[in-house]
Amino acid sequence: MWPEYVCGTDKYGHFIQSLRASEIDTDGLVKIDENQLFRLQGQRMRAYSVFKQELSKRSGVQRYKHTAVIDMQGVSMSMMMGAKRILLKKILDTNSNYFPETMSKLYLLNAPMVFRAVWCAPLPRAMVTAPS
């Protein structure tokens, strides 16, 4: 339902996690109990933590971050709207709330123009409301 791949390491030794957004089965994900889905995502992130510990042991250098590459080709607007969007956001929030500071970099490939506009839209408001 949410296939991810480990594709080696970057020049800093962080492992590279990749996924193709078009492979995410959002119709199947919305059918799963939300608590179960969060537990599954937590298990996945914990497994990545263990993998980073193994990388650290092998290299002799601490590794606690990873790089993510998301291929947005084939993403439909239905994935970015309504219940599916809310669910995907909650899954990603699980990562940042329970596994903070684990991502080194995030690369979005083949992002449609509409996605770029939506991604950048909150920026001006955030800059205006930020305390000085």
Image (cartoon, rainbow, N blue to C red):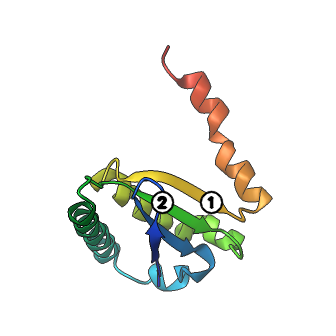
Secondary structure of residue under mark 2: loop
- For this view, does 91 lie left or right of residue 22? left
First-in-chain label (1 vs 2): 2
Front of the two marks 1 and 2:
2
Asked which quadrant contains residue 120, the reply is top right
Q: How many marks?
A: 2
Residue sitting nearer the eye, 27 or 102: 102
Point 47% across, 81% down: residue: 3
Q: Which mark is residue 10?
A: 2
- For this view, does 14 lie left or right of residue 107? left
Task: Give amino acid for label 1.
Answer: Leu
Secondary structure of residue under mark 1: strand
Q: Position of residue 108 (x, y in %)?
A: 62, 60
Does residue 47 sit above or below 117 in this rendering?
below
Does residue 100 sit above or below 68 in this rendering?
above
Q: Position of residue 119 (x, y in %)?
A: 65, 49
Asked which quadrant contains residue 113, the reply is bottom right
Q: Which mark is residue 108?
A: 1
Point 26% across, 53% down: residue: 61
Point 76% across, 57% down: residue: 114
